[in-house]
């Protein structure tokens, strides 16, 4: 059995001559939280709609839960989604909203509905109408609706957009709990990159409808790792001094030395270099966050 729950091959969606998605080929591991990174209008929602069978691809194909598009009869029952605004009946309680959708799946098991309410943190809302919920509560109810039918894959399009910090934290913890407790694979998009960095195990960077790069959390950490940037008058002599200090992870980039695994030793490094007769023009700690990484990527593109 494949380790991937979703694989796309050159998936494309065109509206006339405009390519909203252009030959996207990506893979999502089972049990991953896959962060689809991109600014507004990059093509994230279009991609998710195709995966959820809410929009038909112009060309390309994809495999979902072991089935290949368009033959997705079983796969469609294994995917839940919250794309754009959740479809909520404002005059009904959270329980009744879930019950109404559960009936479409041929069941209205009270225990299962109550379990979903517990999972999304709405167990104590009672008969309160969804129309009076906060935005964060409505988003959590939307996730609860997506959980009807016990899906294996959850697709969430900008679920934290417009939320206050408390709402953002609630959604984040709900997603983490679904992933860890139920082993659910999550595809989540957002332009709030700092939040994706707190959740995702894998990333796909998308811009202007194209997939720019795909990498794991560890690869991203390696690419964004903190380092000490050192600007001296004699780089070769400086490397000798550094190695005598036991610092061996040294790279020479654009006329500067980059040192890793020595973030707390800058004072010691400076003193040793000066004693060695080396002039230190600059020594600084440097790193890169997810947003800067993305901006650098699209800048290169």
Image: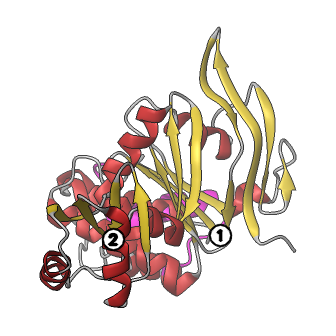
- Dot 2: what SS? helix
- Determine if the magenta segment contains residue 91: yes
The label nearer to you, 1 versus 2, is 2
Task: Say left or right for 199 vs 30.
Answer: left
| Residue highlighted by disc 2 | 237
Location of residue 233 in the rendering, given as x and y in whole percent from the top left corner: 23, 58
Q: Residue at x 30, y 73 (%)?
A: 122
Is residue 89 visible in the rendered image? The answer is no
| Disc 2 crowd, CA 10 A, few/some/many (<14, 14-19, 20+) | some
Location of residue 191 in the rendering, given as x and y in whole percent from the top left corner: 35, 45
Q: Nearer the viewer, residue 194 or 89?
A: 194
> What span is colored magenta in the figure?
89-110
| Disc 1 crowd, CA 10 A, few/some/many (<14, 14-19, 20+) | many
Q: Quadrant of the N terminus?
A: bottom right
Instruction: Using the image, determine if residue 52 lies above or below residue 300.
Output: below
Task: Say left or right for 196 vs 153.
Answer: left
Q: Quadrant of residue 170?
A: bottom left
Q: Quadrant of residue 286?
A: bottom left
- Determine if the magenta segment contains residue 169: no
Location of residue 268 in the rendering, given as x and y in whole percent from the top left corner: 16, 85
Instruction: Using the image, determine if residue 295 lies above or below residue 155.
Output: above
| Residue highlighted by disc 1 | 152
């Amino acid at each position: 059995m494949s380790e991937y729950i979703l694989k796309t091959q050159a998936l494309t969606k065109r509206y006339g001559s405009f390519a909203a998605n252009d030959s996207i080929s990506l893979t999502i591991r089972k049990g991953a939280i896959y962060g689809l990174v991109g600014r507004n209008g990059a093509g994230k929602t279009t991609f998710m709609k195709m995966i959820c069978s809410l929009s038909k691809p112009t060309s390309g194909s994809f495999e979902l839960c072991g089935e290949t598009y368009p033959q997705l009869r079983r796969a469609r029952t294994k995917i839940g989604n919250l794309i754009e605004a959740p479809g909520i009946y404002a005059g009904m309680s959270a329980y009744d909203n879930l019950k109404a959708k559960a009936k479409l799946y041929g069941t209205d098991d009270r225990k299962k509905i109550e379990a979903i309410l517990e999972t999304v943190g709405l167990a104590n809302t009672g008969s309160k109408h969804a129309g009076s919920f906060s935005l964060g509560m409505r988003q959590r109810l939307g996730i609860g609706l997506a959980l009807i039918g016990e899906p294996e894959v959850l697709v969430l399009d900008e679920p934290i957009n417009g939320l206050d910090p408390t709402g953002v934290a609630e959604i984040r913890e709900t997603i983490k709990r679904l992933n860890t407790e139920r082993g659910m694979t999550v595809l989540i998009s957002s332009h709030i990159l700092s939040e994706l960095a707190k959740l995702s195990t894998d990333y796909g960077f998308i811009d202007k409808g194209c997939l720019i790069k795909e990498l794991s959390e560890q690869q991203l950490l390696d690419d964004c790792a903190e380092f000490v940037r050192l600007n001296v008058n004699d780089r070769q002599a400086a490397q000798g001094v550094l190695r005598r200090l036991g610092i061996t992870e040294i790279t020479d980039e654009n006329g500067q030395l980059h040192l890793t695994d020595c973030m707390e030793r800058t004072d010691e490094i400076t003193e040793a270099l000066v004693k060695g007769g080396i002039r230190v023009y600059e020594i600084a700690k440097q790193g890169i966050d997810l947003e800067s990484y993305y901006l650098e990527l699209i800048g290169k593109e």
